[in-house]
Amino acid sequence: MKSHSICGSNKTPGQLYIVATPIGNLQDISPRAVDVLKQVDRIAAEDTRHSGHLLKQLDINTHCIALHEHNERQFAEKIVQQIKEGSNIALISDAGTPLVSDPGYFLVKLAHQEKIKVSPIPGPSALIAALSAAGVATDRFCFEGFVPSKGGPRSAFYAQRQKETRTMVFYETPHRIVASLTALCEQLGGERTLVLARELTKTFETIRNDSAQAILDWVKEDSNQQKGEIVLVVQGYAAPEGDTLSEQTEHTLKALLKELSLKQAVKLTVEITGKKKKKIYNYALQLKDQ
Ligand code: SAM
């Protein structure tokens, strides 16, 4: 896969590989990821020192260049140029899958604009690892990245998701976990099912599925639970009985919302179905939020 270009004169374009690396346990790297990282001309890494340790342990000697959130826009152009001139380049982040709450978006977007082949080398991601072991519905879910760090925006963030019916996944930092869980309980209710997934694939891996209030109490009591890397998985909102619409009403409302304003769609749905306006209006708001 190395380009063997002489002074960049090889004009057959190379390709960009997006390579997932372990989120804790080194053995989670795939043989294919190791092959690609050994064979490319350069590895673009979020933090070259951090990745240097991983690459050394894997006996990978490929040259590393830095691509982090502060220089990404500028360096993406250089990297794309090198690929156009024949280089094969792999992108890795500090841990897990690049672009999942990590840099790489501008590079991948630019690569597509420039018709460069982009190949994923899939592997670990804290999001999917947490979800797979959480024990909450996974047929529909939404990933919401990091919870805001400041109190006001954090409460608003959770409040906006009160009626989200899909399972929600959040990334959180250990020093904010108590404040975050407190806001979550206030806004989504302490009885909501929550999973705290901490230190996944590492020595102190902990996964607890319980009510949000029970998890908050436990984390407050046991300071060990306030350490390490954390994913929160929250069960979606389940409308109380009597709050749901019949399939037919829901179908009508959804069809009308595609063509009309929320107000007009609600008005017509009420006329067509004869159902209560408040219920239909609330449901239309939920659909809009999703
Ligand atoms: N790109 C990474 C991925 O695919 O998961 C995520 C990078 S993001 C900057 C780092 C966050 O991911 C951490 O703050 C934590 O919320 C979550 N995370 C990463 N590794 C984890 C682990 N081993 N256990 C639990 N959460 C983890």
Image (cartoon, rainbow, N blue to C red):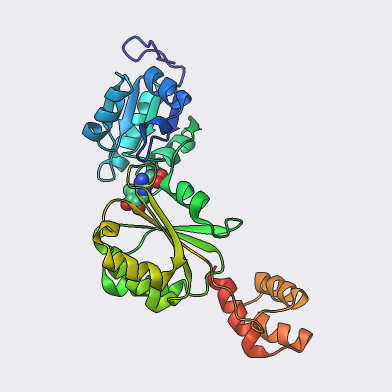
> On the image, which quarter does residue 187 sit in?
bottom left
Task: Out of 146 and 267, give the one closest to the viewer.
Answer: 146
**Residue 269 percent coordinates (x, y):** 72, 82
**Residue 32 percent coordinates (x, y):** 47, 24
Q: Is residue 78 visible?
A: no
Horizontal relation, residue 19 to residue 228: left or right: right
Residue closest to the far left:
49
Q: Residue at 30% across / 41% down in the picture?
A: 72
Classify the position of the N terminus by image quarter.
top left
139 versus 60 height, above or below: below
Task: Out of 152 and 272, give the one closest to the viewer.
Answer: 152
265 versus 44 height, above or below: below
Horizontal relation, residue 231 to residue 151: left or right: right
> On the image, which quarter does residue 149 sit in?
bottom left
Horizontal relation, residue 225 to residue 11: left or right: left
Classify the position of the C terminus by image quarter.
bottom right
**Residue 48 percent coordinates (x, y):** 24, 32
Q: Residue at 28% across / 51% down in the picture?
A: 228
> On the image, which quarter does residue 28 sit in?
top left
40 versus 219 height, above or below: above
Task: Out of 111 and 181, give the one closest to the viewer.
Answer: 181
